[in-house]
Image (cartoon, rainbow, N blue to C red):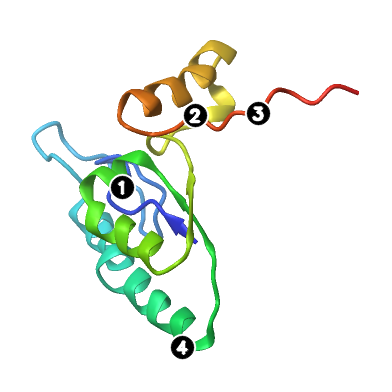
Amino acid sequence: MQFEAGGQPPKVTDSPFPKVDFPENVPSDATADTWFAYGYREGIPRLLDLWDRHGVKVTSHMIGEAVKRHPALAKKIVARGHEASGHGPRWSSQYAMSRDEENSIPDRGARHGGRDHRAAPARL
């Protein structure tokens, strides 16, 4: 399960709505923000209830910004026996990052109380 809602960029976010070039004085795309809010307000809680009823456990891929904005929901996911997986600090195009930028992500997470679970690279 992706837990990213609340961590999306304020504008120009991939959403089901047409792209709008907002003027500088508009802080965010309110329509897309409302659509994403469904995930943390209704979607994830409903899925947790459904999975509890059927004894299903899942891995929740969480981005740091979403967890910082909704820590109670992140704690609820883990408290109900699901696995939390770090999915980066925010919505970003990691494929476009340099190796140094990408390698700095776990270091930044560790400074904010996370743990670094990087394994040594496999050798053939």
Q: Which of marks 1 and 2 is nearer the N terminus?
A: 1
According to the picture, the residue beneath numbered tag 2 turns out to be 116
Report helix, strand or loop for mark 3: loop
Which sits in the foreground, 9 or 82?
82
- Quick one: SS at disc 4? helix
Percent position of residue 108, x then y: 38, 22
- Label 1: how many Cα within 10 Å (few below 14, some 14–19, many 20+): many
Q: Name the residue under label 1.
A: 66
> Which one is in front in this view, the residue at disc 4 or the one at disc 1?
4
CA distance separating discs 2 and 4 = 33 Å
Amino acid found under the numbered disc labelled 2: Asp
Of all residues, the one furthest to the top in this rendering is 100
For marks 2 and 4, the one nearer the N-term is: 4
- Callout 2 secondary element: loop
Q: Which amino acid does label 4 sit on?
A: Arg
Residue 64 location (% of width, % of height): 35, 40
Between the residue at mark 3 and the residue at mark 1, the CA separation in whole angstroms equals 25 Å
Indicate the position of residue 105 as horizontal and vertical percent values.
Answer: 45, 24
The amino acid type found where label 1 is placed reads Ala
Residue labelled with disc 4? 53
* Mark 3 touches mark 2? (CB < 8 Å): no
> Closer to the camera, 26 or 75?
75
Q: How far apart are marks 1 and 2 (CA)?
A: 19 Å
Q: Considering only vertical position in the picture, is 61 above or below 112?
A: below
Residue position for label 3: 119
